[in-house]
Image (cartoon, rainbow, N blue to C red):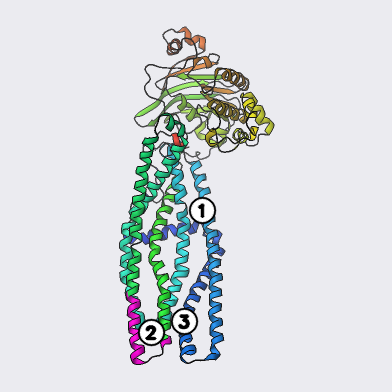
């Protein structure tokens, strides 16, 4: 679906909702979270709810018993009830302490497990999304956004449970105590409710947009910092420190302003609540004092009422503020679901079967493809990479060489035409079986966190240590690996920062060797090597290429002169094909012109007419940032 942004199942979640639909949206998100996770935590929630109800009940009991403390012990001086009342109060506090501990630990355990569960789920989902998503998304910003937003799911459930099972029950119990003690005073106290509700609704309107903007700016800030530190060598080489510092400073200032705005709006509820509560409490005490001094009523009832009123203030204030917290949690949870609701646009076709490679012939038939509607990269391209032979693809930058490699691995789907392996259309086989039959060495080697041994083993997870060391030897990497502090168990650092570019490339080649796949893709596999290392790797590659279908992308013609077949691309079309000798025989041909430009040597393929760099598939932080979302892998 060219040019269309992925949609969520329930439509876009980015727009601000009308106030009357906000509570409905919160309920919808909570129901979804519970539907996805609630069954696994049902008994934990039951225990937490019991604890929270116990906290609420003991709080109400503390207010209730104040009447007997004042009337029976101090007013009527009944010494026989002192022990019973004191033991009852002590028991209430013990129960409340244990219940508070139990619910806190249980809810923390549930919340931590939810965070871990959604982190795993998000990463698994991100691994299923295709290259188009990552080309349009900054990896640093995405990681920061996930890290910041994943807690929203936990907070929504935690705040809902505590506000309902503890604060709401406590408030209802304390109001019941107040009504039983004195209905008229209760009515006076509850007059603060409507203005408090109005204040909450008003503040939510102001807080909603600021909260989402703060989340987005913070994710941009963390992402920018991450990218700057990852590219620190380029930053220093091009003296970009001041420029990036100013840019980061601007983001920091924007984040600070949003945080201050949120603080001003959300904390505005505190003085409003305090003023209303102060008015209610002062009015109640004034009226109760009048009745005690004029009517001579026993103070126990009034004292119990005031205790209940003061104890009710905290749960009422928390309930008033819970909407503020839920607004933040909802924004975070909603942004998480925006990612989870993205559907991979390029899945396995219905009835897809596993690819069975017998010989390994790769056929490109009338291929057309472009990353955007109006910018075709490949145009009606057809050729065959013979089974067990080496096919080299050469051409100027932007000719479509790396795009062919991406299409063969189904990082993208072709717009027209077919790609087949041994007569099997790759669009009708499973991607896992297709990619399992291919070993790939990119021109930009990437190493992952872990040891050298781990990075080579990613080629085939069941490879033995002996096979890993043998592959490293074939890739001319064994010698420098053994010179590392811990040999094969040396940590490589972030993207192999402790290794040279040539060393990283040799590990990438070793990873492809250990995969032992029938099809080998080499995208400028020796471009980062010195002459001596290149000669050794070329010799090693020559050995492992025997009997395998090998497709080599090269700029230097010296690396492809011995290929069985050479395909020359020009502006996404097949310009010519043949052996090295056959192509040189045509003095006016494209290949011969390239050869003359290189002086007959491997000086780097340069086309004086090429102006546009080919958009090869990259890791997320190196994506092209195109506006159009391609079909996903």
Q: Is residue 625 visible?
A: no
In x, y percent, where is residue 393? 49, 20
Q: Is residue 167 above or below residue 216?
A: below
Q: Which residues are magenta?
A: 279-300
Q: Main secondary structure of the magenta part?
A: helix
Q: Are marks 1 and 3 in contact (CB under 8 Å)?
A: no
Q: Is residue 418 visible?
A: yes
Tag on residue 115? 1
Q: In screen coordinates, is 455 left or right of 628?
A: right
Say what secondary structure mark 3 lies in. helix
| 239 vs 270, nearest the viewer | 239
The quarter of the displayed image where residue 206 is located: bottom left
Q: Earlier in the sequence, mark 1 or mark 2?
A: 1
Specify few, some or many for label 2: CA neighbours under 10 Å numbering under 14, 14-19, or 20 or more: some
| 404 vs 14, nearest the viewer | 14
In x, y percent, where is residue 627? 36, 37
Tag on residue 182? 2
Identify residue for label 3. Answer: 64
Q: In screen coordinates, is 506 left or right of 150?
A: right
Say what secondary structure mark 2 lies in. loop
Q: Nearer the viewer, mark 1 or mark 2?
A: 2
């Amino acid at each position: 679906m060219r040019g269309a942004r992925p949609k969520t199942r329930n439509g876009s979640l980015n727009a601000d909702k009308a106030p009357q639909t906000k509570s409905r949206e919160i309920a919808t998100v909570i129901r979804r979270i519970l539907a996805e996770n609630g069954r696994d935590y049902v008994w934990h929630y039951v225990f937490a709810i019991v604890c929270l109800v116990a906290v609420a009940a003991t709080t109400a009991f503390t207010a209730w018993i104040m009447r007997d403390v004042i009337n029976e012990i101090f007013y009527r001086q009944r010494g026989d009830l002192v022990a019973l009342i004191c033991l009852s109060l002590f028991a209430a506090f013990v129960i409340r302490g244990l219940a508070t501990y139990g619910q806190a630990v249980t809810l923390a355990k549930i919340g931590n497990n939810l965070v871990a569960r959604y982190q795993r789920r998000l990463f698994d989902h991100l691994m299923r999304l295709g290259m188009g998503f990552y080309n349009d998304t900054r990896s640093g910003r995405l990681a920061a956004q996930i890290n910041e937003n994943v807690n929203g799911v936990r907070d929504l459930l935690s705040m809902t449970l505590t506000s309902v099972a503890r604060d709401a029950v406590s408030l209802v119990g304390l109001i019941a105590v107040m009504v039983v003690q004195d209905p008229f005073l209760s009515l006076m106290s509850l007059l603060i409710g409507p203005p408090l509700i109005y204040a909450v609704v008003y503040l939510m309107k102001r807080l909603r947009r600021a909260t989402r903007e703060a989340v987005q700016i913070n994710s941009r800030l963390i992402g920018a910092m991450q990218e700057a530190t990852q590219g620190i060598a380029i930053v220093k080489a091009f003296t970009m420190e001041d420029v990036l510092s100013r840019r980061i400073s601007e983001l920091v200032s924007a984040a600070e302003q949003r945080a201050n705005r949120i603080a001003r709006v959300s904390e505005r509820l505190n003085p409003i609540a305090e003023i209303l509560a102060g008015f209610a409490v002062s009015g109640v005490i004034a009226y109760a004092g009048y009745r005690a001094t004029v009517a001579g009523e026993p103070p126990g009832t009034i004292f119990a009422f005031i205790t209940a009123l003061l104890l009710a203030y905290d749960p009422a204030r928390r309930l008033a503020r819970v909407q503020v917290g839920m607004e933040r949690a909802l924004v975070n949870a909603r942004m998480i679901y925006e990612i989870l609701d993205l559907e991979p646009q390029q899945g396995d076709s219905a009835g897809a079967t596993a690819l069975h490679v017998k010989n390994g012939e790769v056929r490109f038939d009338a291929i057309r493809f472009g990353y955007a509607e109006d910018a075709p990269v490949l145009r009606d391209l057809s050729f065959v990479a013979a089974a067990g032979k080496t096919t080299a693809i050469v051409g100027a930058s932007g000719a479509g060489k790396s795009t062919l490699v991406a299409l063969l691995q189904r990082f993208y789907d072709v717009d027209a035409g077919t790609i087949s392996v041994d007569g099997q259309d790759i669009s009708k086989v499973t991607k896992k079986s297709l990619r399992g039959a291919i070993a790939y060495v990119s021109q930009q080697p990437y190493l992952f966190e872990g040891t050298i041994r781990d990075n080579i083993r990613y080629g085939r997870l069941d490879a033995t240590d002996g096979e890993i060391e043998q592959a490293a030897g074939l890739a001319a990497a064994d010698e420098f690996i053994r010179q590392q502090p811990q040999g094969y168990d040396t940590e490589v650092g972030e993207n192999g920062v402790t290794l040279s570019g040539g060393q990283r490339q040799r590990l990438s080649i070793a990873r492809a060797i250990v995969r032992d796949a029938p099809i080998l893709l080499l995208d400028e596999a020796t471009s980062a090597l010195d002459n001596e290392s290149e000669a050794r790797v070329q010799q090693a590659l020559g050995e492992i290429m025997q009997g395998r279908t090998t497709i080599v992308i090269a700029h230097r013609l010296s690396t492809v002169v011995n290929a069985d077949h050479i395909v020359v691309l020009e502006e996404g079309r097949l310009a010519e094909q043949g052996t090295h000798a056959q192509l040189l025989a045509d003095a006016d041909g494209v290949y011969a012109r390239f050869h003359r430009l290189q002086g007959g040597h491997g000086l780097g393929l340069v086309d004086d007419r090429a102006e546009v760099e080919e958009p090869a598939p990259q890791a997320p932080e190196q994506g092209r940032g195109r506006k159009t979302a391609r079909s996903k892998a």
